Every structure is written in C-alpha cells, then in structure tokens.
Image: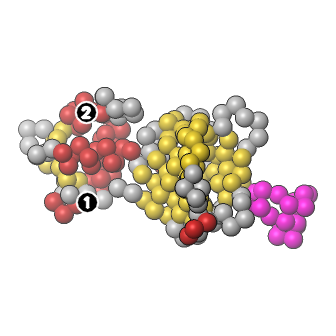
Amino acid sequence: MVEILKENPNRLEFETLYPGDELVITTGLADEAYRYDFAVNSTAGRWPSGTLKETNPAGAVVGPFDFELHGCGDWTTRQQNPVQDQRIAFTPYYEGLIVGRFMWGKPPGAGDRLVFDRPGQKITEITHIPFRENTLLQYLGAQAGAATVKQIVEFTEELTHPLTERDVRATLAGLVQSGIVLAQKKKALQFALVESSS
C-alpha cells in the first residue's frame, strides 16, 4: 500500500505518520531530480524524527543521518506578501509537506534549519509507505487462511516497531473499510485479504 502525491495542492499531513513509515520525497524533474528517503523512527515530538538519505542526480548517496522533518515552505518577496518586513522571507507549512514547496528540517541538536531550496528543486512527488498497513498486508498475505488480532500482535512483537492491539484493530478497521481486507466471524473474529487485492 503506497500513497503517491504528485500535483499541487496535494499534501501529506504529519499526523498521519507513524514509526516505521517511509517517505520518498522527490525534488526537481528528470535528470535534475534529487531523491530523499526519510524513515520515521518517532512521532512523539513536535516533528517526526528519523533518518534522511539523499541521492543526487548523479546517483551519489549522502547519509542516512539523523533528521527531524519540519515541513515545507516557500520563499516570498515583499511584492508577493506586502505585510512582511524582510525583502524576502521563507513562509513555512509546519504540519506536513505540500507538493510544489521546498522541504526543510534539521539534524537533532543543530541550531539552524536546512532548507532544500536549490533552483528548480521544489517537491515534485511525495510517496508515503505506511508501515502499519504494509506490515498487516504482508502478514495476511503470508497466511494460508485468516488471522486473528492476537496472532498479528504476536507477529509484530519481534519487529523494530511493534504494534499494540489498539494499533492493529485501528489499522484493520481502515483496511476493511477500504475493501482490501475482509472480516470473518468464526470462533474468533478473523481477517483475510480480499481475493482480488492479493
């Protein structure tokens, strides 16, 4: 399960992120595109924190290094925004990322934020790879039959980001509502992938 955002004003809200999620953020186009892989480790603070890896257009990789993703924003001038005092200012969007804006954040402990604002490097695509949904789909796909919430929770106990029973139930409810997973009442409530989505 993957959510891809490509066109303005699409945006990814940080409140939808959970530990284990991955974001692939592309800035720029074609042979001038940069790729940023952000792995979410924690959402407990004001901003999601994790590791960031940069791949430049030549294929050289920097990182991964610890990073807090603070959101995105855009440069504005006095002509665009007459109420600002500065000749040019960076207007932030703190709660997430918007296609067509510059990414920004900082390594933990650093004083200044980094703005990824090379010429022509606005965000062109955001791919959200949700850990919870993918973990459940992977587990259900590997089962010959259906699985209970308890079995799924036990499976995730060994993972880097284990899921609570509440996490599993909430995620399954979303997958059932979207028609990807089927709830079956036998001796216990069980869940299985819908045939056409496997």
Based on the displayed image, in which of its 4 quarters is residue 25 positioned? bottom right
Residue 96 among magenta residues: no
Tell me if I can see residue 118 in this picture. Answer: yes
Residue 118, placed above or below residue 40: below
Residue 7, given in percent of the width and then of the height, sits at 54, 70
Q: Is residue 174 left or right of residue 119?
A: left
Circle 1 SS class = loop
The residue at the point 46 percent across, 42 percent down is: 18
Residue at the spot of label 1: 179
Of 82 and 55, the residue lying toward us: 55
- Point out the frontmost of discs 2 and 1: 2
Residue 122, given in percent of the width and then of the height, sits at 65, 63
Residue 191, given in percent of the width and then of the height, sits at 19, 46
| Magenta segment | 74-91
Circle 2 SS class = helix
Q: Is residue 52 left or right of residue 180?
A: right
Of 127 and 43, the residue lying toward us: 127
The residue at the point 30 percent across, 59 percent down is: 178
Crowd tier of the residue under label 1, counting other residues whose Cα lies within 10 Å: few below 14, some 14–19, many 20 or above: some
Q: Is residue 186 left or right of residue 192?
A: left
The residue at the point 15 percent across, 44 percent down is: 143
Residue 6, placed above or below residue 145: below
Name the image quarter holding the N terminus.
bottom left
Circle on res. 155: 2
Badge 2 amino acid: Phe
